[in-house]
Image: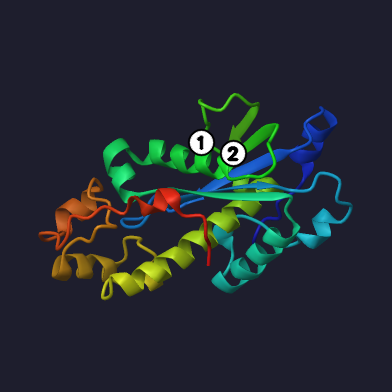
Amino acid sequence: MATAATLDLERTLHRQGYRFIAGLDEAGRGAWAGPVVAAAVILPPEHPDLDTLLDGVCDSKQLTPSTRMQLAQRIWDIALAVGVGFGAPALIDREGIVPATRHAMMQALRRLHVTPEALVLDYVRLPQMPLPQYAMPRADALHLCVAAASIIAKVTRDCLMVLLAQRYPGYGFAVHKGYGTPDHRRALIQKGITPIHRRSFTPVRALAKQSPANAQLDEFDNREDTC
């Protein structure tokens, strides 16, 4: 059963004088293909029924795809501000998954139309961001703003992988979303790597044949749309 995220930390920070608190989380760090996607969510600080309106919002990994889609729409409708950022496969290969995750988070913050005064993050800190930061394990399961960000990031990435499945048929991206499943492994052996595969990841290097293309998808750095 999913653990309910709460507003306890957000309310504590509000009492300390921080009004606009951005929760951040990412999706896709462990995938073999596709970008890492981050979301930043600022919830309305004075909304009286926020707990009720966002009932069911928790760590996105504990939710079914249909429930995530429903809750993502509710978050977009209720949130004071939402930003989404991308770390392209080429960036992951060039700089590593943690720097690419931070890049996506910084991009998500820049796309907020409200300036945050404090950040709550799931484990990863942003040293380049001069704001109070509260980073802790399982923040996506404990704190509502981070749980909301985890849902937005996951739904956005899943939608993107469905679109990429049309561009690169035969890999099953719409099903496994780029993660290391047996079907994905078989497709890599049979078809080789695509421009959206993370060439620096050991399973991709070990399993892939000669790639049919060398194009890089830096377009992720400029995407602002979601499904």
Q: Position of residue 165 (x, y in %)?
A: 34, 71
Tell me if mark 1 has few (under 14), some (14-19) or many (20+) residues whose alpha carbon lies within 10 angstroms of its own: some
Q: Is residue 214 above or below residue 103?
A: below
At 59% from the left edge and 24% from the top edge, which residue is drawn? 130
**Relative to 35, 124 lies left or right:** right
The quarter of the displayed image where residue 132 is located: top right
Q: Where is residue 167 shown, x and y percent of the image?
A: 31, 71
Query: Which disc is residue 121 wearing?
Result: 2
Q: Crowdedness of circle 2 by 10 Å Cα count: few (<14), some, many (20+)?
A: many
Q: How many marks?
A: 2
The structure's colour scheme is: rainbow
SS for callout 2: strand
Secondary structure of the residue carrying numbered label 1: loop
Please tell me which residue is depicted at 10% across the width and 59% down the height of the picture.
Answer: 210
Amino acid residing under circle 1: Val
Q: Gap in Å between the C-alphas at discs 2 and 1?
A: 6 Å
In the rendering, at what x and y percent does residue 117 appear?
70, 31
Say which residue appears at 70% left-offset and 41% top-offset: 114
Circle number at residue 124: 1
Residue 60 visible to the viewer: yes
Residue 26 is left or right of residue 63, and the answer is left
Contact (Cβ within 8 Å) of mark 2 with mark 1: yes
